[in-house]
Image: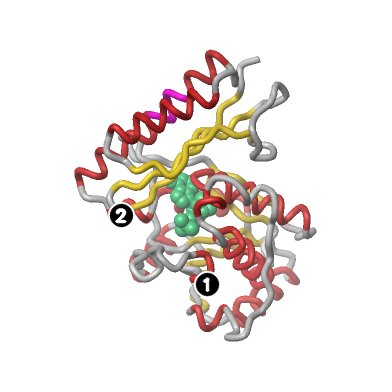
Amino acid sequence: MIIFRKKDELQAFALKTKRAGKTIGMVPTMGYLHAGHLSLIDAARKRADVVVVSIFVNPTQFGPNEDLDRYPRDFERDSQLCAEHHVDVIFAPEPGEMYAPDASTRVEETKLSGPLCGASRPGFYRGVTTVVSKLFHLAQPDFACFGLKDAQQCFVIERMVRDLDFPIEIVPCPLVRDADGLALSSRNRYLSADERSRALSIHRALLAGREELERHGVGDLAGLAGRAKQAIAAAGGRVDYVEALDRADLRPPTEKTQWVLLAAAAFFGATRLIDNELVQVKK
Ligand code: AMP
């Protein structure tokens, strides 16, 4: 396994690999790897000749009052896990290597980035699409794996790749949960034992919403979201949003809607958690 810290090293490696006729699969991450990340790496490993994992806590996607400084980092452990999962290349640049001090170009998706996390975290998706564009130019992947834990992010990247003609296939991968249902996240490590058990209410509320949608369709989405919010608040969570949107355009569902993204974000203590269920609508 090779570790690159410099952009030009990765790009030269990628060009050489492509010229040799090999395929590259990429998994962009912010590190502090868990089984969710590893499932993406395993999916990439199955299909690509060469697997590149990036580990970069991207400052431009964090707001001024967010957790950039305390975001968990453990490069030794991450690189051991990558080696165990047969990763070929880790790309782990410093922020100063990634961005020129006077960088003045951004990539922005303007529709799917609007609701949900886009509404609560201004500038977040612009930071994500900009850094992912840069990573794609550096690693030249044939495909890249993204987790449906961050479903909106995955859809925004799919749209960006389509709109800007990146020759890259986006591979959405299933959300991985702990045995008790909590969606795996690097941020779960911030939770106390008590907060963690109360945070299970998010998934429970989404499952109740899923059942309602499967039984009754999209007739009472405001009621459904209200009940989910109440359940999370009753467990001590501070709800950011619970929304049911059409998976295709992240707008309110209509009679034509086939899949609903039922998504929630809530704080337990100072920790903001997100989760979702993708539900096929009863017709
Ligand atoms: P992050 O390190 O949080 O930026 O996540 C890097 C990638 O891992 C993104 O594509 C995430 O959607 C994915 N990911 C994070 N948590 C999970 C999970 N619990 N299940 C599946 N994919 C995940």
In the rendering, at what x and y percent does residue 229 appear?
A: 40, 33
Q: Residues within 10 Å of mark 1 (few under 14, many from 20)?
A: many
Q: Residues within 10 Å of mark 2 (few under 14, many from 20)?
A: few
Q: Which residues are magenta?
A: 205-209
In the rendering, at what x and y percent does residue 171 appear?
A: 63, 48
Give the structural element (helix, strand or loop) at label 1: strand
Q: Quadrant of residue 220?
A: top right
Q: Amino acid at mark 1?
A: Phe
**Who's the residue at 55% across and 14% down the image?**
216
Q: Nearer the viewer, mark 2 or mark 1?
A: 2
> CA gap, disc 2 to disc 1?
30 Å
Residue 42 visible in rendering: no
Q: Amino acid at mark 2?
A: Ala
The residue that label 2 is drawn on is: 270
In the rendering, at what x and y percent does residue 18 appear?
A: 72, 68
**Who's the residue at 59% across and 52% down the image?**
145
Q: Main secondary structure of the magenta part?
A: helix
Foreground residue among 68 and 91: 68
**Who's the residue at 69% across and 39% down the image?**
249
